[in-house]
Amino acid sequence: MRPEEQPEAPSGPWRFASAATMGAVGVLCKAFLGLNKVETHGMEGFLKLLDEREDVSKRARGLLTVSNHISVMDDPILWGILPLSYMFNPTNHRWGLGSYDLCFTNKAISTFFTLGQVLPTHRSAHSQFGGLFQPTITQAIRLLSHGPFLYENDPPTKPVTSLKSPDLIDPFSGGHLTFSTDGHDTFPAPSAYVSRRHAWVHVFPEGMIHQTEDRIMRYFKWGVSRLILESEPMPDIVPIFIEGFDHIMHETREFPRFIPRPFKNVRVTFGEKLDAEEVFGDLRQRWKQMCAQEERVGGEMAIGVLNETLKYSEEAVSLRKECTRRVRQAVLDVRRQRGYPEDDPKNSLAGTWLREGPQREGRKEDGSITRDT
């Protein structure tokens, strides 16, 4: 698909189904939160930011929100705090990343989560297609960016048919508006549409649930750094710190495990929008210099597509590490506003968490509980 052929929006039936899905889930989450004591901080400023983004044509950049991850139902229950008017407007609502092997196992479930603006994401511990260079991260980068995008350097977009494939596409539009996560499946490519430019993407960079009494966060995974370094232009970034959702869906809960527990205390704190140029500008400048050097040798690359040097070189890895550290610190700053003590800098390092022991999930030696999501 050439850039000039980028369509304005998905089909009308698809847009209606997406608005209905997101609105219905939002209403259910708001109703459930009504059974709890909910406290929010900084939400007025966040809603003002969303209001400024209402007109897609006037958006100057994407929106990236980042938070800690403390329960399997953080998303979507978290967004039940938004006013109802925001819930039925998918073009101004979040895109999230959902585990492929949990949320995209068959056509029915895949359709539900895709209409709910969740991108199929492979987890490295469960799939050979996982990691920060998977096609879904490219989609997230492009959702945050302006477009139109070059597609000539992308991996092949026509997937090989597979019996395992959900084969999920918008049945009301052309099948060329798709991408594949593993070369066999087919999913709608949200970034292919003009109406999705400068979208809102939310991520939980810890990559797994972490429940602990003192609200310590695990290290952040490097995928979030790609969203900041490679999106064009750099998105607005809002750190969020959440509390109480672990009591709603604690990992020690007994039967029936699938039912959220009401009558809990929930608190959501929105940090102020970061001065992204001040926090990440030097890293972005170094990244662009690297990209320019590689393109002088190998030609222009599409947004979200990297060569081996930009993936694995020492400088590229160093930039991602530092960018990820700064994102985590931004969330820690919001955590500190809620009265928690300073975090041990060693907690930002993956090696530190070897203290949890060899078991990936469950109760750890330090008393915390983790679970893959």
Image: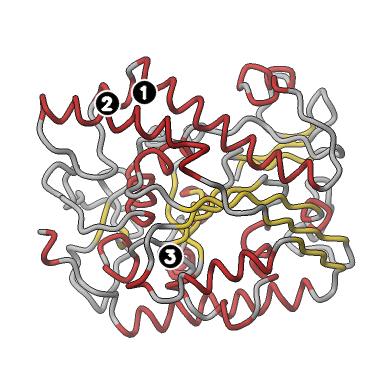
Mark 1 near mark 2, Cβ–Cβ under 8 Å? yes
Q: Residues within 10 Å of mark 2 (few under 14, many from 20)?
A: some
Q: Which residue is mark 1?
A: 316
Task: Identify the mark at residue 114; answer none if there is no mark.
Answer: 3
Other-residue count near label 3 (Cα within 10 Å), few / some / many at <14 / 14–19 / ≥20: many
Quarter in which the C terminus is drawn:
top right
Q: Is residue 257 above or below residue 262?
A: above
Residue 271 or 36: which is nearer the viewer?
A: 271
Which quadrant of the rendered structure holds the N terminus? bottom left
- Mark 1 belongs to which amino acid? Ala
**How many C-alpha atoms fall within 10 Å of the one at disc 1: few (<14), some, or many (≥20)?**
some
Q: Position of residue 230 (x, y in %)?
A: 34, 41
Which numbered disc flags the more N-terminal residue, 1 or 2?
A: 2
Q: Nearer the viewer, mark 3 or mark 1?
A: 1
Query: In terms of sequence position, does the residue under pointer 3 or pointer 1 come before the other?
Result: 3
Circle 2 residue: 290
Q: Give the CA distance from mark 1 to mark 2.
A: 8 Å
Question: Tag 2: residue type?
Answer: Met
Residue at 63% x, 40% y is 330
- What residue is rendered at 12% in x and 67% in y? 5
Q: How far across and down, in percent of the image, does residue 201 sit?
A: 48, 56
CB atoms of marks 3 and 2 within 8 Å: no
